[in-house]
Structure formats: structure tokens, C-alpha cells
Image: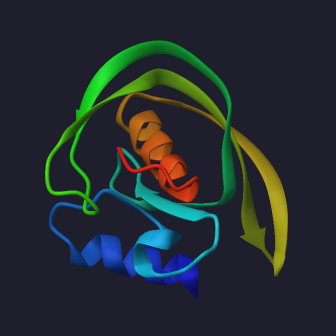
């Protein structure tokens, strides 16, 4: 239900492309983001396994008033889990560009880091 709440909240906000569970009052390590096709993707227990090509990004956030400069990586490999038939199954995914930046931002939220 937390994953569905994240998806519904993203869809209801004009400026949101990603959310972490702690942004909607849940203390679970779950994130959701819209992929390049605009479809919601959910990751349970995400973590960055590898990162390449650092750059400085200026990010806005629903949790902060002002945009903030932060170091991001243009290419990341993420380890995470998906929920299938009531069980969490380990997955890995390579992300680049906007999706990589969004997932890094949400993982920061999961770790209590606000940009």
C-alpha cells in the first residue's frame, strides 16, 4: 500500500517526478519515480552499488524551499528489491541521466539526507 500511495502522490503533483516513503510519513525504505516513458517504477530497499561520471546538479525538492547544488553521478548501478507474489526479489539496474539523478535523490531521502 505504501508503494501505491507513492505512485498516487507523484501522479497528483505537477512538479513531482520521484518520492521516498519518508516524504509521505512512512519509515520504510521504498522509493518511486517516473521513468523516461512516464511510467512509475518502485524500488524496495534501494542502494547504490556503483557510480560513475560525477557532476554538480542543482536540485529542487518538495522537502526544501530553495534548490540546492549537490554532487550526482550520471551512471549508477542500483541494487533493490521488487515485490512479486508477496515476496521481495533482488534486482539490479543500470541507470543514466534523469532516472539516475532521481534515484540518487530518493536514496538520499531514505538515508535522512536532504539536498
Q: Quadrant of the N terminus?
A: bottom right
Please state which of residues 106 and 92 is positioned toward the viewer in this rendering: 106
Please state which of residues 94 and 78 is positioned toward the viewer in this rendering: 78
Left or right: 11 in relation to 114: left
Please state which of residues 72 and 32 is positioned toward the viewer in this rendering: 72
- Residue depicted at 82% across the width and 79% down the height: 85
- Residue depicted at 51% across the width and 22% down the height: 75
Q: How many marks?
A: 0
Q: Quadrant of the C terminus?
A: top left
The single residue placed furthest to the top in the displayed view is 53
- Residue depicted at 35% across the width and 49% down the height: 37
Q: Work out whether 67 lies above or below 19.
A: above
Instruction: Give the image location of residue 88, x and y in percent.
Output: 82, 67
Q: Quadrant of residue 56?
A: top left
Q: Quadrant of residue 87?
A: bottom right
Left or right: 23 in relation to 46: left
Left or right: 70 in relation to 110: left
Amino acid at each position: 500500500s505504501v508503494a501505491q500511495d507513492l505512485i498516487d502522490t507523484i501522479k497528483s503533483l505537477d512538479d513531482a517526478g520521484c518520492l521516498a516513503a519518508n516524504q509521505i510519513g512512512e519509515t520504510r525504505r521504498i522509493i518511486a519515480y517516473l521513468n523516461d516513458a512516464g511510467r512509475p517504477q518502485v524500488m524496495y530497499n534501494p542502494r547504490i552499488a556503483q557510480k560513475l561520471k560525477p557532476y554538480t546538479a542543482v536540485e529542487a525538492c518538495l522537502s526544501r524551499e530553495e534548490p540546492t547544488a549537490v554532487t550526482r553521478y550520471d551512471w549508477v548501478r542500483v541494487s533493490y528489491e521488487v515485490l512479486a507474489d508477496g515476496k521481495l526479489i533482488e534486482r539490479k539496474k543500470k541507470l543514466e541521466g534523469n532516472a539516475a539523478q532521481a534515484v540518487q535523490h530518493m536514496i538520499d531521502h531514505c538515508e535522512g539526507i536532504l539536498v
